[in-house]
Amino acid sequence: MKRISFPELKDRIIKAAVLALTAAAVMAFGTQAEAQTRIRDLVTVSGVRANPVYGYGIVIGLDGTGDQTTQTPFTSQSIVSMLQQSGITLPPGANLQLKNVASVMVTANLPAFAQPGQAIDVTVSSIGNAKSLRGGMLLMTPLKGADGQVYALAQGQLIVGGAGASAGGSKTVINHLSAGRIPAGALVEREVASPFLLGETLQLELTSTDFSNAIRVAEAINNNMGPNVAQALDGRTIKVRAPSNPNDRVAFLSRIQELSINKAMGSAKVIVNARTGSVVMNQAVMLENCAVAHGNLTVKISSTPVISQPAPFGQGETVVTEVADIQISEAGGELIEIKGAAQLSDVVKALNALGATPSDLISILQAMQTAGSLKAELEVI
């Protein structure tokens, strides 16, 4: 047996440690690069959704910040109708001067599988000229669906996340005073029919159309729940055979939602908000070599009034004219070479090298896409 000296043994131990660390880094990188996504984060169940409901209501108890009834006559009409239902009859032609009442619209989302007696949150918004809903209370308001049926009843004290004050013709307002919320402010009165337990199959719908993800979801279900259980119908819909027993169907769908797939990388896309100048791009965006010259064009217009007066005791009139001064200046822009980049971080560094503002960057990206250098879909919202 060959003897190994201590220095040689030390070198071998160091090399083995380096190889082990390298292998661990490669495995960690591969795991991160192939990060899996749960099916529950990619799909929704067809028919399992919230339903919007709304209703017209009255808020009372305001501190003189309600509707001006002369400009919002429907507020007075609502109060008169409510008083008549309570057995109170006003004399004909009565002119109500209400300051503590406001007409509002009440909106809410009825969650899937909501049962009678369940409490849901509601949002209350003024439809008149009330200055503030702070401190008000919503009277009982029926909330109707698209079919005209009443599905919930709302009532309660408003929570308005704002404040305001006025004096001497000046006022200051913090946040928004014309809308508020009532947590658990409505009780469900009618159940919405759901197709979840109807039929032999369920349909899973991808949140975004992608044929690769549709196939991968169907394959993951078939591999774990049995062959021919799932079938991809198109780039968004997957049909799944499910048990007929309600308890078994719920457990079946629960297991499907916990399955994971290797999500396909989406198409390269750059989203541009022309109103705010925001630019957002995903990790699939790539750049090819190009050269960009960017400069600023400034137009400055100033106007100076010139007054011409007639001579003393003259019959002329004073005339005011303006002398305009227009200046146009253009800042020089150097031609900058942008090297091709495949990683999002490299794309960001290349675009930051231009030193352009977000609004200028929008024009640059559009020009780069036209030139074929930007390998992404440019969407303006």
Image (cartoon, rainbow, N blue to C red):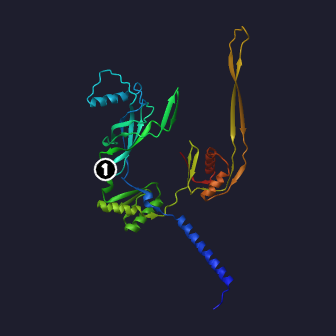
Residue 370: x %, y % from top left: 61, 49
User: If the image is split into quadrants, where does the N terminus sit?
Assistant: bottom right
How busy is the neighbourhood of tag 1: few (under 14 within 10 Å), some, or many (20 plus)? some
Quarter of the image where one finds residue 16 = bottom right
Taking the spot 50% from the left edge, 61% from the top edge, the residue there is 264
Residue 160: x %, y % from top left: 44, 39
Taking the spot 34% from the left edge, 30% from the top edge, the residue there is 78
Quarter of the image where one finds residue 312 = top right
In the displayed image of the protein, which residue is found farthest to the bottom? Answer: 1
> What amino acid is found at the position of numbered circle 1 in the picture?
Gln
**37 is higher (above) or lower (below) than 18:** above
Taking the spot 72% from the left edge, 12% from the top edge, the residue there is 310
Residue 358: x %, y % from top left: 62, 46
Q: Which of 57 and 359 is in front in this view?
A: 57
Residue 57: x %, y % from top left: 36, 35
Q: Mark 1 points at which residue?
A: 115
Q: How many labels does the image show?
A: 1
